[in-house]
Image (tube, rainbow, N blue to C red):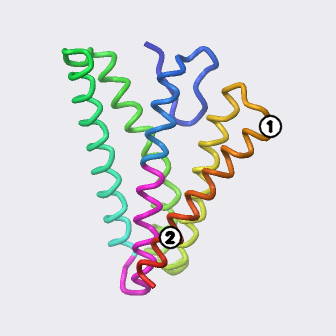
Amino acid sequence: MPTIPLHREPPEDFPREQIADVLKERIYVAFTALTVLVALSAHGEDVGAGEAVWTLVLTVLGTVAAVTVAELIAHIVAHEQLMTRAEWGHSLQVAGGAMTGIVPSVLLLGGAALGWWTTATALHVGTVLLVVWLVGIGFLAARRVSLTFWQQVIVLGAEAVLGVVVVGLKLLAHG
């Protein structure tokens, strides 16, 4: 079974279903991370960089674990058997790749821990980068299918708007 390198896009001949798995998981993790960063930002200076990293990483690991277990159970229900070694490997690879979206935020928070900038700055910049990441995921999805230019713009715009809506809802909730 071909593997998807974490640092670049899958090859053109890679099965669409597996590409969809990769994109879907990255979207789940990005929205989870976005929600965590915005929630932490709402606490202002009460949150330290170390606490923020710990919260972000644990939440994302929990989300990835939940999605992986859900996929395993869904597979058992749909196919009445356990995943093969190759299917399990694909599932774990997709889960690991999805976590790459939090790397910039973790690095920013690391910089805050070193005193290079404030934790609040790291959280705000991390939030913006995650919205950009979501648009990037939408771009990868839109360009692989036969959509018109305007349909691709709508897909990318919807992804960006949803990211901004998450930020807005969290800000309203924490007023």
Up-down relation of residue 158 to residue 93 (above or below):
below
Q: Which residues are magenta?
A: 29-48
Up-down relation of residue 99 to residue 50 (above or below):
above
Would you say 127 lies left or right of 72 here? right
- On the image, numbered disc 1 is attached to which residue? 149
Mark toward the start of the polypeptide (1 vs 2) = 2
Quarter of the image where the C terminus is located:
bottom left
Up-down relation of residue 82 to residue 70 (above or below):
above
Report helix, strand or loop for mark 1.
helix
Q: Is residue 31 magenta?
A: yes
Question: How far across and how far down the image is residue 145, in percent?
Answer: 67, 26
Quarter of the image where the N terminus is located:
top left
Q: Is residue 166 magenta?
A: no
Residue situated in front as seen by the camera: 152 or 82: 152
Look at label 1 and name its amino acid. Answer: Phe
In which image quadrant can residue 8 be found?
top right
Residue situated in front as seen by the camera: 85 or 136: 136
Would you say 104 lies left or right of 76 here? right
Q: Residue at x 39, y 38 (%)?
A: 96
Per the picture, the main secondary structure of the magenta-coloured stretch is: helix
In which image quadrant can residue 137 be found?
top right
Would you say 1 lies left or right of 13 here? left
Question: How far across and how far down the image is residue 150, in percent?
Answer: 79, 41
Q: Residues within 10 Å of mark 1 (few under 14, many from 20)?
A: few
Look at label 2 and name its amino acid. Answer: Gly
Q: Residue at x 37, y 62 (%)?
A: 56
In which image quadrant can residue 59 be found?
bottom left
- On the image, numbered disc 2 is attached to which residue? 111
Q: Residue at x 58, y 50 (%)?
A: 134
Question: How far across and how far down the image is residue 4, in percent?
Answer: 50, 26
